[in-house]
Amino acid sequence: MGIVYRWFMRPFLRFQDSERAHRRALLGLKFMASFWPARWTLRAGCSHRVELPVNFCGSTYKTPFGLAAGMDKNAEALRGWLELGLAFVEVGGITQHEQHGNPRPRMFRADKAEALVNRMGFNNQGSLNVQKRLERYSMRHGVYPVPLWVNLGKSKITSLEEAHLDYATTMERLWPHASVFVVNVSSPNTPNLRDLQNDDGLIRILNACQRVNNEQAALSNGKVKPVLVKVAPDLTDEQLEHMVQTARQHGADGMVVANTTISRPEASNAKEAKVFSEQGGLSGQPVKSRSTDMIRSVYRLTSGEWPIVGVGGVASANDAWEKITAGATLVQAYSGFVFEGPGLGKAVAKGLKQRLEENKLSSIKDAVGLDHRS
Ligand SMILES: Cc1cc2nc3c(=O)[nH]c(=O)nc-3n(C[C@H](O)[C@H](O)[C@H](O)COP(=O)(O)O)c2cc1C
């Protein structure tokens, strides 16, 4: 599937506007998952039987690899993701209020660098509409068979002082459908959002989310759900250390490392220079090493006792392995799917199994943080 995608689909996508290509791919996936011959084709090319069970925040994941936030903001292609052999799916960012995001164009592709720049600005249908969609899904198809993560963002019209209420409302509406919540205070495309990475803002959000979490768990006679914090790769080492301490002290169950960066690498040609000059967050290969370094720091700071999810530039099993051995228990990708196609989940799962065998390790758990022990 990877070769077919790289040789036939990718050159074709080059001629399309990035956001339009993304929209078509999402609708294509949704369509293919809706009737069995197409679903079967998808499954034949992309799904796999590799089992690499790993425990994360009390739940077992089939493999450590899943979909990162931003790809399916409104949870529209849920059945499609299931056919791609992913162990978990993160939808969103979802905000309390529906919003259109920034004016277009707002997504740009640098093919040679395998990077994207985006300034989407949390375009999404809002918590009420997504709630209705998830209710419809569960009525038709039952409980989602893999952990469904919800990425929480802040509505643009909500002030920073009231941000905690925005996050908490979305969480309350989507609580019955989600397995894990990710508090996103690190997108560079909502004005001043990253200020919420500071103590005051973050503590208020975590307190408000934990209040909802406890209330909903009591109402449903169930357990509270893990709440993770997603950080920006542009934090200094001191800021990261401080944020880890604050998030941990205020009940966050782990960290997603990391979001897109506002920094830019050197461009190798004029087209790339143009893409890199666009305002927004950069993702893909250029963020890979910074994200892995941050994972290593968080693992060291928490003595490997606090769950880490690694994201940033994962486009192969080797990339995923690097993040796991640096300290991530789970790994996600967004840009990797754009450049490698829908077979990425299968390639990563198979490759990780091989890496375990080569290193004579019996499980992913043994590989998590391996760099720190060797
Ligand atoms: C177009 C686009 C939209 C994104 N939207 C979100 C979002 O809504 N919430 C979020 O936490 N991260 C969002 N991200 C960041 C990704 O989840 C991920 O952290 C980042 O892209 C680095 O991973 P990658 O190199 O695999 O793309 C978005 C990324 C892209 C490219």
Image (cartoon, rainbow, N blue to C red):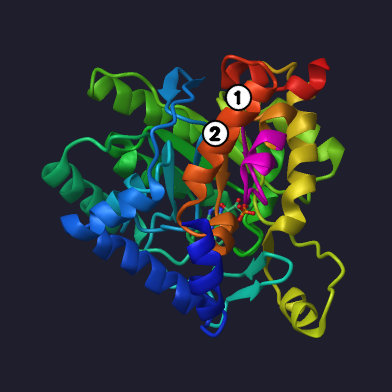
The answer to whether one can see residue 252 in this image is no
- Spot the residue most to the left: 140
Quadrant in the picture for residue 6? bottom right
User: Which residue corresponds to the image point at 46% horizontal and 34% vertical from the top-left?
Assistant: 209
As shown in the figure, which amino acid type bears the numbered disc 1?
Answer: Pro
Residue 90 at what x, y percent from top left? 44, 45
The CA distance from mark 2 to mark 1 is: 9 Å
Q: Is residue 315 magenta?
A: yes
Residue 295 at what x, y percent from top left? 73, 34
- Could you tell which of marks 2 and 1 lies nearer the N-terminus? 2
Mark 1 secondary-structure assignment:
loop
The reply to whether the C-beta atoms of the residues labelled 2 and 1 are less than 8 Å apart is yes
Q: State the residue in front, 73 or 312.
A: 312
Q: Is residue 369 magenta?
A: no
Q: Which residue bears the numbered disc 2?
A: 228
Q: Which stretch is magenta?
A: 309-322
Q: Label 2: how many residues lie within 10 Å, few (<14), some (14-19) or many (20+)?
A: many
The answer to whether one can see residue 221 in this image is yes
User: Which residue corresponds to the image point at 60% horizontal and 24% vertical from the top-left?
Assistant: 307
Q: Which residue bears the numbered disc 1?
A: 307
Q: State the residue in front, 323 or 124.
A: 323
Q: Quadrant of ligand 1?
A: bottom right
Left or right: 248 with respect to 165? right
State whether residue 301 is above or below residue 229: above
State whether residue 297 is above or below residue 264: above
Quadrant in the picture for residue 362? top right
Left or right: 118 with respect to 276? left
